[in-house]
Image (cartoon, helix red, strand yellow):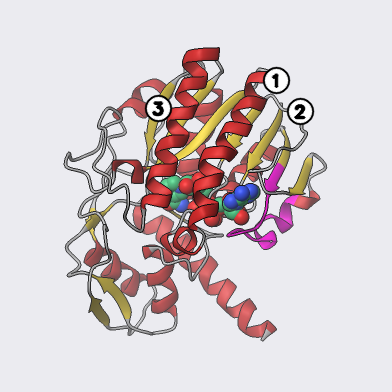
Amino acid sequence: MRVVVTGGAGFIGSHLCKRLLEAGHHVLCVDNLITGSERNIAELRHYPHFAFLYHDVTQPFAFEAEAIFHLASPASPVGYMEHPIETILVNSHGTYLLLEEARRQQARFLLASTSEVYGDPLEHPQREDYWGHVNPIGPRACYDESKRLGETLTMEFYRQYRTDVRIVRIFNTYGPNSQPNDGRMIPNFITQALKNEPLTIYGDGSKTRSICYVSDLVEGLMLAMFHPQTTGEVFNLGNPEEHTVLEFAQTIIRLCHSSSPIVFEPARVDDPERRRPDISKACRLLGWHITVPMEEGLRRTIEWFSKEQSSLSAIS
Ligand code: NAD
């Protein structure tokens, strides 16, 4: 198939492009590099069926595709708080333009949404039919609310035009190609632990998170797009194994053989207390399962960050 991946030079998008190429698809990666990096797709340029288009998907562009994965959006708090308007536009107008193309070309469309649509959830774990608890005017709203609007647009294209859409709500994902300074918990902790610097915990460390290794997430994206009978469906994709932030910090210090202390800073505004997906729908309908245990995924990620740090310090 000819497949378009918007945001393909980002963390998850780069892994998805590689997985699609390995499956024999032709991939057009479209990215304006606002938070992504050409480094992430450097190795993909050797595939004959890979093409990169430097483009802002809030502007129309010509392409032919049978499937469109719409991943373009700043995703880390640092990224979307630095680019709030761009974040709103790519998730609203960008989503609209891509849905129009999916409708015109009768292509499959997948919206990469987020667990942030649940806000600071009052139900635990979160199922797809939970409506969320979101602050519409807080500093995270540019991300949460624009993803919610993107979901609404996607479902209206399904209801009005029967466009072949699906929505995936991604929970915290980690792995190689994530940006070391993007403010997300795992990259932060690993970068700090590898340098034996203090690990910063916002709050008292009792908030919980569940993290999914990127290869598992990408398998979920592939299934959601290509598995039969996913049209019009919404799937949570993430790892339901829940740990406190303090436990993540301690595990990473141990796996990095680090001497870093842990320091506590005030909790961030609107940072959710607990986040854990209910993935029973994806397991049942897609046959999707987590295969990479947390410590194994963390080891692979630490190894990648450690190589990155060495190559960056060799350059400087
Ligand atoms: P990322 O920032 O690494 O990648 C996003 C990519 O989109 C970047 O390469 C960026 O340059 C590109 N982009 C942004 N705006 C664009 C525009 N207007 N035109 C073209 N390209 C644009 O983030 P990621 O972690 O890879 O996230 C990918 C998707 O998954 C996002 O939609 C995000 O909301 C969603 N998601 C990610 C996570 C996670 O844990 N990583 C969790 C929930 C949802």
* Comes first in the chain, label 2 or label 3: 2
Residue extending farthest right: 48
Do the CB atoms of the residues marked 1 and 2 lie less than 8 Å apart?
yes
**Residue 260's x, y, as percent?**
32, 83
Q: Quadrant of the N terminus?
A: top right
Q: Disc 3 marks which amino acid?
A: Val
Q: CA distance from mark 2 to mark 3?
A: 25 Å
Rendered position, 67 above or below 265: above
Q: Which residue is mark 1?
A: 105
User: Is residue 69 or residue 260 the one in the foreground?
Assistant: 69
**Residue 92's x, y, as percent?**
52, 39
Q: CA distance from mark 1 to mark 3?
A: 22 Å
Circle on res. 64: 2
**Residue 146's x, y, as percent?**
44, 43
**Residue at 72% over, 56% down:** 43
Q: CA distance from mark 1 to mark 2?
A: 7 Å
Rendered position, 300 above or below 257: above
User: Is residue 97 or residue 65 the one in the foreground?
Assistant: 97
Magenta stretch contains residue 52: no
Residue range highlighted in magenta:
29-44
SS for dot 2: loop
Other-residue count near label 1 (Cα within 10 Å), few / some / many at <14 / 14–19 / ≥20: some
Q: Which residue is mark 3?
A: 234
* Comes first in the chain, label 1 or label 3: 1
